[in-house]
Image (tube, grey):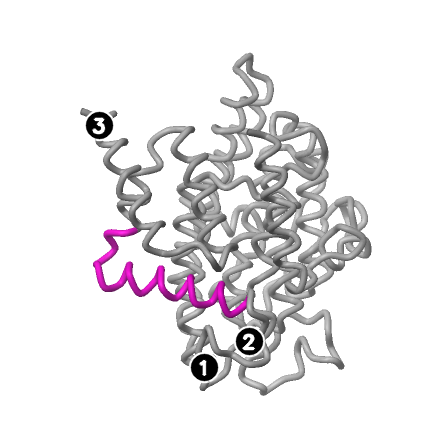
């Protein structure tokens, strides 16, 4: 079974060889330049100040977070690239590389050639990522996974983003209590499970479940908080953004292990530029076949979910009723998103059968 999976993975890597490059030297872009310790960030009087509207500093949040949690991730795999947290900096890398952190209004040069490290407060994508970077980071500091407990962390909040931003753990907890609690729960689970006597398989399942609970709530929170910024984009980009959020529901329910390698594989074929009016997958001339396919599949998944009033996502969640079904679900998503020859009708028929099997288990 392992040999079959390895062969399949190698075939997919070859298939997506032309996908967007999100890494440098095998790591997310900017990783090597980003500070790796809390003490490397600007500080005065035992207060570290973070500017999450700078790409390098936002990437540093992830580098510190991944490095500080590695010791709890032994059950994930045999090396330090197996942590599910790797998916977060790779999301940021894709958004940066594809121009999605640039000011979409064109009113400033933020994120453009003259100011490439600037993250625009007008960017919907940057806004969504805020809830996947600042909040988890502050939660990890609070739970003692980052820092020595003596250094306080302050977060810069530009005036134009003050309403949606927060400046400290206390401030963020007050604004987003449920979200902060969910990420604290993940980090506590990480510590507790890693020290338990259960099998690595069980540890992995529990850690991934808690991780995706945090990421899902971050996305749900961002969906509401960042909604107004969608007005700055073309209708194809808005449609893609919505389909991207919808796809996350499927990935989360399957407990996708967003390791470094897996994340590169799944994010590589995401569109390498912001979509414009007139773009219509799978026939966007300046995007690769792989990017067109991913856009088309994401769009199909979202349209079906909208037409059927959310029942496909509900069915998918019901089908992910056990660790074995989630494993099958991850394989099914891989085939649907990464293999252009995999028919959507096959996806639907397999999903229907999986749902029936889960229903049988619950009766």
- Residue located 34% across and 62% down the image: 302
**Position in image of residue 178 (x %, y %):** 40, 44
Tell me if mark 2 has few (under 14), some (14-19) or many (20+) residues whose alpha carbon lies within 10 angstroms of its own.
some
Q: Is residue 67 above or below residue 153?
A: above
Q: Quadrant of residue 236?
A: bottom left
**Residue tagged by mark 2?**
274
Q: Could you give the CA–CA distance between mark 1 and mark 2, rounded to whole angstroms?
A: 9 Å
Disc 1 and disc 3 in contact, CB within 8 angstroms: no
Q: Is residue 45 left or right of residue 188?
A: right
Q: Is residue 294 left or right of residue 101?
A: left
Q: Could you give the CA–CA distance between mark 1 and mark 3, rounded to whole angstroms?
A: 45 Å
State the SS at label 1. Answer: loop
Residue 175 at least partly seen: no
Per the rendered image, the range of residues in magenta is 291-312
Q: Quadrant of residue 110?
A: bottom right
**Position in image of residue 358 (x %, y %):** 27, 31
Which mark identifies residue 360?
A: 3
Instruction: Determine if the magenta segment contains residue 307.
Output: yes
Which mark identifies residue 234?
A: 1
Tell me if mark 1 has few (under 14), some (14-19) or many (20+) residues whose alpha carbon lies within 10 angstroms of its own.
some
Front of the two marks 3 and 2: 3
Disc 1 and disc 2 in contact, CB within 8 angstroms: yes
State the SS at label 2. Answer: loop
Quadrant containing the C terminus in the rendered view: top left
State the SS at label 3. Answer: helix
């Amino acid at each position: 079974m392992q040999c079959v999976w390895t062969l399949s993975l190698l075939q997919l890597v070859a298939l997506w060889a032309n996908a967007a490059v999100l890494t440098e030297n095998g790591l997310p872009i900017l990783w090597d330049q980003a500070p790796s310790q809390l003490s490397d960030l600007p500080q005065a009087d035992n207060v570290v100040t973070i500017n999450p509207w700078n790409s390098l500093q936002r990437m540093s949040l992830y580098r510190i977070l991944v490095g500080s949690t590695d010791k709890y991730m032994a059950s994930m795999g045999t090396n330090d690239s197996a942590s599910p947290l790797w998916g977060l900096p790779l999301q940021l890398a894709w958004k940066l590389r594809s121009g999605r952190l640039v000011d979409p209004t064109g009113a400033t040069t933020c994120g453009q050639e003259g100011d490439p490290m600037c993250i625009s407060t007008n960017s919907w994508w940057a806004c969504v990522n805020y809830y996947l970077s600042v909040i988890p980071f502050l939660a990890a500091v609070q739970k003692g996974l980052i820092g020595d407990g003596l250094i306080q962390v302050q977060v810069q909040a530009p005036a134009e983003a003050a309403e949606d931003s927060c400046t400290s753990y206390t401030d963020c907890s007050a604004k987003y209590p449920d979200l902060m609690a969910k990420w604290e729960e993940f980090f506590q689970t990480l510590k507790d499970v890693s020290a338990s006597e259960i099998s690595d398989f069980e540890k992995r399942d529990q850690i991934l479940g808690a991780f995706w609970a945090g990421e899902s709530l971050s996305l749900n929170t961002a969906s509401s908080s960042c909604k107004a910024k969608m007005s700055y984009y073309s209708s194809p980009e808005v449609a893609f953004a919505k389909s991207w959020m919808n796809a996350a529901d499927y990935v989360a329910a399957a407990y996708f292990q967003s390791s470094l390698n897996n994340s590169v594989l799944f994010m590589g074929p995401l569109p390498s530029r912001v979509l414009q009016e007139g773009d219509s997958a799978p026939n966007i001339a300046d995007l690769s076949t792989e990017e067109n396919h991913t856009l088309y599949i994401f769009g199909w998944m979202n349209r079906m979910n909208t037409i059927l009033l959310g029942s496909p996502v509900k069915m998918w969640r019901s089908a992910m009723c056990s660790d074995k079904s989630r494993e099958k679900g991850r394989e099914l998503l891989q085939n649907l998103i990464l293999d252009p020859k995999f028919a959507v009708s096959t996806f639907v028929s397999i999903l229907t059968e999986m749902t029936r099997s889960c229903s049988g288990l619950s009766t």
